[in-house]
Amino acid sequence: MYEAYLADFEDYGPKTVDEVRKYLDRTRRSREIFEKISEYIPYGVNSNQRYYPPYPIYMKRARGSRIWDVDDNEYIDFNMGYGSLLVGHANPTINEALHKQLEDGILYTFPYYLLEELTDIITDILNIDMFRFSNSGSEAVMFAIRLARAFTGRDIIIKVEGSYHGTYDNVLFSIWPFRGLAGPRKMPVSVLETMGVPDAMEDLVRIVPFNDVDPLVDILEEEGDDVAAIIVEPVMMNAGIIKPEKGYLESLRKLAYEYDIVLIFDEVKTVLRAGLTTASQLYGVEPDIITAAKAIGGGTVISLVGGIEEIMSLVGPTESIREQGVVHAGTYNANPLSLRALYVTLTEVLTEKAYKSMMKLNREIIDGYTELLNEYDIPGYVEEFGVSGALIFSENRVKNFRDLMNLPFDLWYPLYYAMLNRGVIPMATGPEEMWTLSVQHTEDDIEKYIEALADAFEVVSEAKRYVEEW
C-alpha cells in the first residue's frame, strides 16, 4: 500500500515523490486510522473537502495558532477551519465564556436572554433589519432561497458558475463542472454536481459567469418574470479569491430592482473577513438578504440569514390557510453555547487592533509569495481579501471561473506536502482554497511560514517542469 501511495505522484518529479515519502513516514498513525475507518466512513472523512490523496492527517488537539496530529507532529495552522477561526484555536477569552456557559447548560430549546443584546449588535454590524439563526452555511442558504421564493412567488434561482453555496439541492450546480459539460463561456450550462438530486431541479437553476452581466441580462429578458433570486458571493471565495470588477455588484443590484428579484449575497465566507463588517458594506451595495456563518461563531456551530424587514417578516408559523408563514426551525438554532461564543467574538475578540495586526501579517505572507514567484519565474500572483489570501498560478488576473479552469492546479500538491513536512498547514485543503490569519498568529509564525515556503518552492519549481511535459 505504501508504494501504491507513492506511485500516484511519480509524474511530479523526484522531489515531490520524496516529499510524499516523508509525509507517509511522519504520519503513520494517521495512515492506520484512515485505512481502518475508511471501511466504515467513506474516504475516512465526514466532509468530502477534507479528503486529499494519499490520505488526510488526523488531529487530536489545537491551541493558539498550532494544531497537533495523532503522530505528535506540530503544525502552524493557516487553514483555521476554512476561515471559521479568526479567533484562533481554543481562544482563552472564548474558552472562559464557554466554560461558564457549560455550567449553565448548553441547550434549552427556549429563547436565550442574550438575544436581547445581540439583536442590536448584529443588525448594526451586518446592516440588516431582521435575522434568524441557524447552524450551518448550507442551512442559511436553504432558508434564504425559501424566503426569496416566498416573497416573489417565483421558483427559478440564478447562481454564479464556480460558486459554492453549501450542500442544498438547489445550489449543487456548476460548482466545479467538467470543461466538456460546462457549455459556452458566455452561456454556461447548469451542470449537476452530485447524484441524488432530482432532474426536475435543473429546470429551476440558471448559471451565469462572475463579473459579466450580459449573460444575466439575456436570461432576465427571457425569463425575468419567473426568477425568484440571484445568489452570489460578493467576493468569490471558493475559487481562490476573485474580486468583483468595478460596477459588477452595482449592476446586479440594479437588475434585481428592475425585475423585482431578490438579491442574495452569500457572505458565509466574506463576513468579518476584512473587518467587523460585510463585503456588501465594503463595496457599497445593499442586498435584500445576506447569509453569514463561519467566522461569526468563534469556532462554534452557528449561521444566520438576515435582510430587509419586508422579506424577513414573512417568517413565522402558519396561522390559517390564508395566512401562511415561512417555515424556519431547528432544535439547535441559537443554542446558548453558540450565542455566547458569537457574543464574545464580536464584542471582545475581533477588535480593530486585532484586524490591524492580522492584515499586517497577511501582507507579509503575500510579499513572501510574490518574491518567490518572481525568483523561480513561476507565473502567478496572490489575491487577498482582508485576513485571507489565495495563490493563483496565472500570469493574468482571474476574473471568473472559466479563467480559473485552465490553470495548473497540479502544482498545489507539491507545495502542500512540502509545507506540511515543515510543520506548516499553508492553507485550507485544495488548490481552490485560501489561507486565513487569526488573532493568535504571531510574527514568528509568519517567519516560519516563509522559511518553509522557500523550501517548498524548490519542489514546486521542479514539479512545474515535469507537469509541463505531460
Image: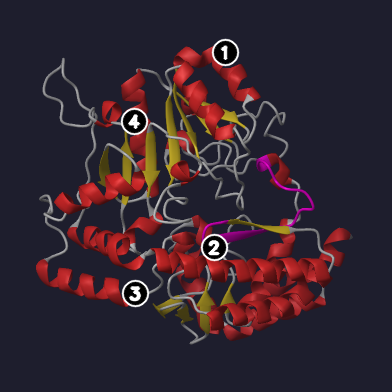
Over which residues does the magenta segment extend? Answer: 385-401
Mark 3 or 4, nearer chain start = 3
Task: Identify which amino acid the numbered label 2 is placed on.
Answer: Tyr
Task: Identify which amino acid the numbered label 1 is placed on.
Answer: Glu
* Residue 274 tag number: none
Callout 4 crowding tier (Cα within 10 Å): few <14, some 14–19, many ≥20: some
Whole-Å distance between the Cαs marked 3 and 4? 35 Å
Mark 2 or 1, nearer chain start = 2
Is the C-beta separation of discs 3 and 1 under 8 Å? Answer: no
Q: Label 4, secondary structure: give it.
A: helix
Callout 3 crowding tier (Cα within 10 Å): few <14, some 14–19, many ≥20: many
Instruction: Decide whether residue 398 is among the magenta residues.
Output: yes
Q: Residue at x 52, y 14 (%)?
A: 223
* Residue 51 tag number: 2
Q: Which residue is mark 3?
A: 91
Q: Quadrant of residue 305?
A: top left
Q: Residue furthest right?
A: 469
* Residue 146 tag number: 4
